[in-house]
Amino acid sequence: MRYLNSLLGLAMFGFAAVQYNDPDVLLWVVYYAVPAAWALLAAFRLDLVRSKPGMLGLWASIVIGLGVVVYYWPAMPGFWRPAVFMVEVEGEGAREGMGLMIAWVVLLLTMFSARRQPDTRS
């Protein structure tokens, strides 16, 4: 799970990095950096994630993340189809919504891995 969490954390930081030209860049960087930080913590500091404050923080991130996903849920029918992503203006909502869905799944996978993964590190 360490490798998976590392890969997901780096991917989420990559998502955050490409937000540089977005008008509300700080908001989107936070949306992607939070799951990235949790995934990398689960990869390299599992004890922090498994601590009581860590689990509370991760659960709070999951609940808030679900609210953000619901808020940004794409209104376009068939938003998952690649043809929708190619539309410049109308596809923006679909791209944002799908990105947030991916970020939320990363949070869920982090929780799953933190609860299942044996702690073999000292």
Image: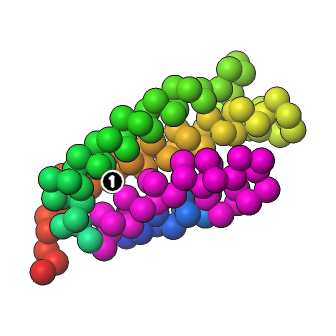
The secondary element bearing badge 1 is classed as helix
User: Which of 65 and 27 lies nearest the eye of the viewer?
Assistant: 27
Quadrant in which the N terminus appears: bottom left
Write down the quadrant of residue 85 in the picture. top right
Q: Residue 73 in the image: state x and y as whole percent.
A: 59, 26
Q: Is residue 28 magenta?
A: yes
> In the picture provided, is 64 more to the left or to the right than 11?
left
Residue found 68% across the figure and 20% down from its top: 75
Residue found 37% across the figure and 58% down from its top: 38
Q: Which residues are magenta?
A: 16-44
Residue found 37% across the figure and 44% down from its top: 61
Q: Residue 28 in the image: state x and y as whole percent.
A: 62, 49
Number of marks drawn: 1
Residue found 33% across the figure and 66% down from its top: 41
Q: Dot 1: few (<14), some (14–19), or many (≥20) neighbours within 10 Å?
A: many
The three-letter amino acid code for the residue at tag 1 is Thr
Q: Residue 8 in the image: state x and y as whole percent.
A: 46, 60
The residue where tag 1 is placed is: 110
* Dominant secondary structure of the residues highlighted in magenta in the image: helix
